[in-house]
Image (spheres, rainbow, N blue to C red):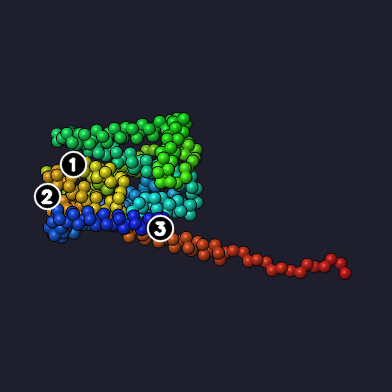
Amino acid sequence: MSSGRSSRVKLLGSLLLAAAIFAFLATRVDIAGALAEIREMTWFELLTIALIAGWNLVTYWALWMAVTPGLRWTQAMTVALSGTAVTNTVPGGSGIGVGLTYAMLDSWGFSRGRGTLAVLVTGVWNAFIKLALPVLALALIALQGDPSRTRVAAGAVALVLLGVAVGGFGQMLRSHRAAARAGRLAERAANRARRLLRRPPVHGYVDATTRFRSRTRDLLADRWPAITGAALVSHLSLYLVLLVALRHVGVGDAEVGWAQVLFVFAGTRLLTAVRFTPGGAGVVEVLLIGGLVAFGGDPDQVTAAVLVFRALTWLLPVPVGAACYLGWRWRQHRRAARGAGAAPAVPSARAPRRAGP
């Protein structure tokens, strides 16, 4: 099967899966009741949640500025929102987004090495935050006197995963030998998978990992507080959109506490780290609604809040990101046109002057 046909099949399968999930969800919740709850929101409530959603978009590019010294905020906005738009609309859009990130950074004069470092550090820090938030939420719920065996087990698993991830990453940064070992393990795993797919082996993981270690140590030496803070603020801003949406539609703290909302939000983010539909469409909605209703939220109000949340954090970045991408393409076209227009003319050939009579 050709790569183009395989991509179309994956896209169709992903869209069908999302449609099936939404159809199932429609049989379990009262969509009309949820829309009625949304229509009852006041203008002040709509304005405040729109401002918070706008702030959430701003935090998308703060992390890119932290991991890419010299990147201007307009460039960070373009690369962050364009990548988000791709991820939210295309199955497996993360890979396409990475390619787009390389192209944009290259157009602004950043080397491929710096682009790779930015992509990897951003991914690692986002993974750390996704692993840490469920543990934090569970601890907060326990302090409020509402733990359960299932939640304790989930928090313990997340804590173990977080410890393994942070410990392994820290060991790789401390030791050149550990970095080389990690590269060899990654190369073996990749080649086993490629053999199953009947593809030739790949090499160079060890060199790539050791170079990544060296560059990461230099970057983190001065910027790890800014990187950590930007990643944490970005995730918590996304959570704040969900929390405010719940409160605006009438789900009070007595029904679902803020720590419980954080637990459902963090658990959903962790469970949908690998997405089978564009932007987790359908899956995220089911997990959020199911978790919040299980904590005691009214089904109609919870559904309304989740619909508002997804409209502002999944749908809104798509047109905004598309506009950023088109603006970048337009500037690239203008730059190419100016370069072509400024090309020096080829001097006309002249007959050589004869020396002497």
> In whole angstroms, how far apart are the C-alphas of marks 2 and 1?
14 Å
Query: 294 or 36: which is nearer to us?
Result: 294
Q: Amino acid at mark 1?
A: Gln
**Around disc 3, counting alpha carbons within 10 Å, would you say few (fewer than 14), some (14 to 19), or many (20 or more)?**
few
In the picture of the structure, the residue carrying the numbered disc 3 is 4
Q: Is residue 213 visible?
A: no
Query: 318 or 56: which is nearer to us?
Result: 318
> In whole angstroms, how far apart are the C-alphas of marks 3 and 1?
44 Å
- Location of residue 127 in the rendering, given as x and y in whole percent from the top left corner: 33, 41
Q: Amino acid at mark 2?
A: Asp
Which is closer to the viewer, label 2 or label 3? 3
Looking at the image, which residue is at 63% across and 66% down? 345
Mark 2 or 3, nearer chain start: 3
Mark 2 or 1, nearer chain start: 1
- Location of residue 202 in the rendering, given as x and y in whole percent from the top left corner: 47, 42
Tag on residue 298?
2
Horizontally, residue 343 falls left or right of residue 135, namely right
Horizontally, residue 110 falls left or right of residue 283, namely right
Horizontally, residue 165 falls left or right of residue 154, namely right
In the picture of the structure, the residue carrying the numbered disc 1 is 260
